[in-house]
Amino acid sequence: MKFIDEAYIRVEAGDGGNGCVSFRREKFIPKGGPDGGDGGDGGKVFLVTDAGLNTLADFRHRRIYKAERGHNGSGRNRTGKSGADLYVRVPLGTRVSDRDTGEQIGDLLEKAQELPVARGGFHGIGNARFKSSTNRAPRQSTQGSFGECRNLQLELILLADVGLLGLPNAGKSSLIRKLSSAHPKVADYPFTTLYPNLGVVSPDTDRSFVIADIPGLIEGAAEGAGLGARFLKHLSRTRLLLHVVDMAPAADAAGPADAVRRILQELEKFGQGLAGRERWLVLNKMDLLNPDDFEQRRQALLGDLGWEGPVFGISALTGEGTRGLMYALMERLEELRKADDTLDAEPIDDEPWDPLAEKE
């Protein structure tokens, strides 16, 4: 199935059922009085995460989702049945926004998480509810209110612990193939990767993390050039970035230091905190250089950049250095997860916002 990470849909909650005007009519009971029942409430619309989905492609074929209308009330004080709620399945990592207002409604990041997005109409009132000492035979009732309608934008942002970035042909797809069981396309021409790829890395039993590969970036990616611009947002939820650098000398290519700076400029332009995200340098294609030449180029690169962060030399093709990188990533991610668990353990007084709550 083709990867789709954006979709536009319209959700329509059910209208409320109408109240009924009715009078009791039974033998030997004259002037039985009003007995019109209320209508039923309209169904609500929820988005619910489904771990079995990994794309928004299903929304290409169906764009409008309607919940059931509430049933009308009837005589003998019978209340109409409420409309059934509608649950629309979306992948984990879906961000939901209102297209008309630009308001972000919520992020769906947990399994079986439900997000209410459209409120059902309120039921109409039957004439039995209008009976009073001065109005013994009311003939008025109310109509059910309309259900809420919203135009939504769905954005799928992949949930990964580690994100790969770099220029085209830097070796990102080869690296994810070596570290995980994912099998993205690998070839000796630029832009082999057209869609994001996810891979699960398992250094040991019961220890794993998810790594994401996006299409290579080029200059101007933040403004829409190339393929990577559309998918940069998938790195916004990663804990750590691996910046893959092609260390093999090439006459028609930029030097490693220039390549690193170009990528950093695109991250700064794109925003969303990507430039400040923890980033490791992964110097790839060491198999194409002898050890002395590789070390010389490595020292020149680090000196030119003034780099003080983690650096790993690897060959994604042969696997040299990848095992050490994998375990270092696992240890660092476990530290970050432990820190997150400590923060989550602290009590928080704020209640979650419910967009369907009644407005005061």
Image: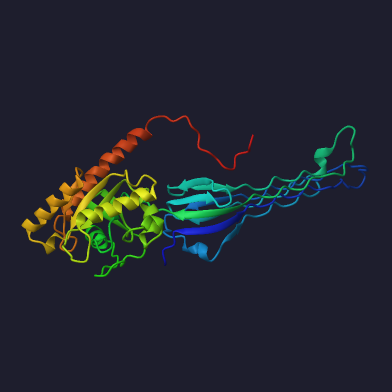
Residue 149 in sight in this render: yes
Q: Which quarter of the rendered picture does the N terminus lie within?
A: bottom left
Question: Residue 111: horizontal and vertical position, in percent?
Answer: 43, 49
Q: Which of 47 and 264 is in front in this view?
A: 264
Question: In terms of depth relative to the viewer, which is nearer, 65 or 321?
Answer: 321
Residue 237, horizontal then vertical, whole percent: 37, 48
Left or right of 314 in this view: 208? right
Determine the residue positioned at 69% across, 45% down. 122
Q: In which quarter of the image is residue 331?
A: top left
On screen, residue 187 versus residue 15, left or right, reads left
Q: How many marks?
A: 0
Q: Can residue 158 be seen in this view?
A: no
Q: Is residue 246 left or right of residue 267?
A: left
Q: Position of residue 146 (x, y in %)?
A: 70, 50
Residue located at (12% from left, 62% from top): 287
Please name whichever residue, 289 or 259, is drawn nearer the observer in this view of the structure.
Answer: 259
Position of 114 relative to 1 (above/below): above
Q: Position of residue 148 (x, y in %)?
A: 64, 49
Query: From the image, which quarter does the C terminus lie in?
Result: top right
User: In the shown orientation, is residue 117 left or right of residue 233?
Assistant: right
User: What coloring was used for the rendering?
Assistant: rainbow
Residue found at the far left of this picture: 292
